[in-house]
Image (tube, helix red, strand yellow):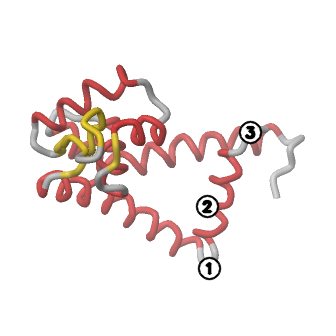
Amino acid sequence: MVDLSDQAELRRSIELFYFGYRAFTVRPDRVLERRGLGRAHHRILYFIGRDPGTPVSGLLRTLEISKQALNAPLRQLVAMKLVVSETATYDQRIKLLNLTQAGRALEAQLTGAQMKHLADAFRAVGRDAGGHWRAVMAALLSEP
């Protein structure tokens, strides 16, 4: 258990979080960089892949970003034929997003590297590591 009065331990936790995230993203970042893409592109690919046919408004809510922040990377993914945007049959104002076959392959490569990284780390730490880690991450999401 972390002693909240022990600033050194909390600072070490912050550093581990920072450097852990950097290690978690390094492999996908290299793949993305070779294609002229970045982490924002990966997040877009990931969440469209998790929810095929998601409307643009749903992606904006999930990522908690503005239309302006989404516009350029999404347009680039569409131009690269990694994402397709189709008008919803039930409402012409709604654009539904899906990954193309190439988009699914890239998303699988990027996320697959991260899943392997997490699986290896959980296995190294031992039983219930994944559950404890998810509990900590969920707790970080809650407002103080």
Residue under pointer 2: 134
Which of label 1 and label 3 is nearer to you?
3
User: Who is closer to the viewer here, 81 or 41?
Assistant: 81
Residue 9: image quadrant is top right
Which of label 1 and label 2 is nearer to you?
2
User: Who is closer to the viewer here, 78 or 110?
Assistant: 78
Residue under pointer 1: 127
- With 98 as the anchor, is 44 left or right in this view? right
Q: Residue at x 37, y 24 (%)?
A: 67
Circle number at residue 15: none
Residue kind at label 3, given as amino acid type: Glu
Q: Residues within 10 Å of mark 2 (few under 14, many from 20)?
A: few
Residue under pointer 3: 143
Helix, strand or loop for disc 3: loop
Pointer 1 with pointer 2, Cβ within 8 A = no
Residue kind at label 1, given as amino acid type: Arg
Q: Residue at x 65, y 45 (%)?
A: 141
Helix, strand or loop for disc 2: helix
Outermost residue to the bottom? 127
Q: Residue at x 81, y 52 (%)?
A: 2
Residue kind at label 2, given as amino acid type: Arg
Residue 44: image quadrant is top left
For the residues labelled 3 and 2, the Cα–Cα distance comes to: 16 Å
For the residues labelled 1 and 2, the Cα–Cα distance comes to: 13 Å
* Mark 1 or 2, nearer chain start: 1
Q: Where is residue 80 drawn, in percent x and y?
A: 10, 38
Q: Where is residue 142 drawn, in percent x and y?
A: 71, 45
Outermost residue to the right? 5
